[in-house]
Amino acid sequence: MVKALLTFRDALVNRSSTWKNALASWKCPTDPSSSDEECDPCSKDWSGNWEHIHCRGSSAGYGEGSRGVYDGYVTNVHITDMHIDGPTPREMCLFTHLREFDLDGGNQAGPFPDWIADPSCVPGVQELDLSYNRLTGTLPVSITTKPLLSELKVEHNEMVGSIPPEIGSMPSLRVLRLEFNHFSGTIPASLSKLNGTLNQLELAHNDFQGDLHALANLRFLVVSTSDNPRLCGMVPMSVRYAHGYNPGKTNLGRPCPEPKQA
C-alpha cells in the first residue's frame, strides 16, 4: 500500500500548487512514535500519518465513527476544500480497498470520471463525493456498476442530462445528491425499486420535469425539489413529509400539462 500511495503522490504533487499543498504531509520517514516501519502512511492505528487518508480496516464501515481492525489498507481518501484541480485522477484505482472517495470542495473540471466503470477500480467504494466542483457532462451509466455504492454526491457542479434509469438497479444506494446542476428529464420509474434503501434524494435547482409518481413507495428522510419549474402533479406523501421538502418555484401540486399531440 505504501507503493500505491507514493505512486499517487508522485503523479499528482507537481500537477499544481493546490495539489502540492494538499499532499505536503505525504513524506517519508514518518513519525517513529506512530509508525510500525520507517515509512508508514497508515500509522499504528486507523488515523493515518499522512493527511487526508484513513486506514480503517478491510471489514469496517467507511464512516467517521468506524475504526475497524487495522490491517494497513487505505480505505478513505478525503481531500476536501483544498481547491485541487482536475481532471479527477485515475490513480485512485490504485487503492483496491478504498471505500470512501471524497474530493469535494475542489476545482475538478471536465466530465465525471469514466474510469469508474473498470470493475477492478475501487470495487468496494461506498461513498463517492465529487460535490462543489466544476464537473460537466452527464452522469454516466457506468456509475451503476458499483454494487456497494451507498452515497453518490455530485451537487453543486455543472452537469447536464437525465438520471440514468439504471440507477434503480443499485442495491445499496441510500443517498443521491444532484442539486444545483443542470440536470433535466423526468424522474425514472426505476427509482421505485430502491424502496428500503434510498432515503435521501436532492433534486433542487435543476430542470427536472413531470411528476414524482416513481417516488411514491419510497421512505425518505430528506428530499429537496425546489427550483425545478417543470416538476408538477400530485406530491406523494413520502416526499411531502420528508425533511427539506419545499415546492417553491415548481408546479408540484398542480396538474401536469397534457402531452402535445403529434
Image (spheres, grey):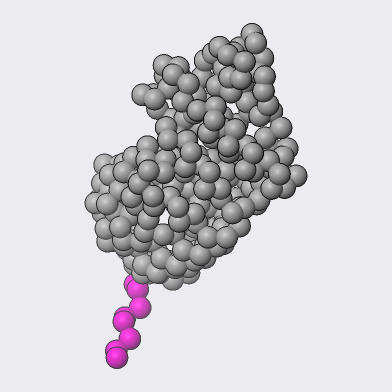
**Which quarter of the picture shows residue 252?**
bottom left
Q: Percent from the top left, x then y, of residue 183? A: 47, 64
Give 30 or 178, whichever is nearer the viewer: 30
Q: What secondary structure predominates along the stretch shown in magenta?
A: loop
Relative placement, left or right, of 76 versus 222 is right
In the depicted structure, whether residue 126 falls above or below residue 67: below
Give 186 or 35, whichever is nearer the viewer: 35
Q: Answer whether residue 247 is visible to the viewer in this image.
A: no
Relative placement, left or right, of 200 versus 40 is left
Position of the C terminus by quadrant: bottom left
Q: Is residue 22 magenta?
A: no
Give 140 or 39, whichever is nearer the viewer: 39
Q: Percent from the top left, x then y, of residue 85? A: 66, 50
Residue at 51% from the left image edge and 64% from the top image edge: 137
Q: Percent from the top left, x then y, of residue 158? A: 57, 62
Query: Magenta segment range?
Result: 255-262
Residue at the extreme bottom: 262
Give 85 or 235, whichever is nearer the viewer: 85
Instruction: Report the label total.
Output: 0
Q: Percent from the top left, x then y, of residue 15? A: 69, 48
Q: Answer whether residue 109 is visible to the viewer in this image.
A: yes
Residue at 53% from the left image edge and 52% from the top image edge: 155
Residue at 57% from the left image edge and 43% from the top image edge: 103
In the depicted structure, whether residue 54 falls above or below residue 138: above
Residue at 58% from the left image edge and 45% from the top image edge: 104
Residue at the extreme top: 33
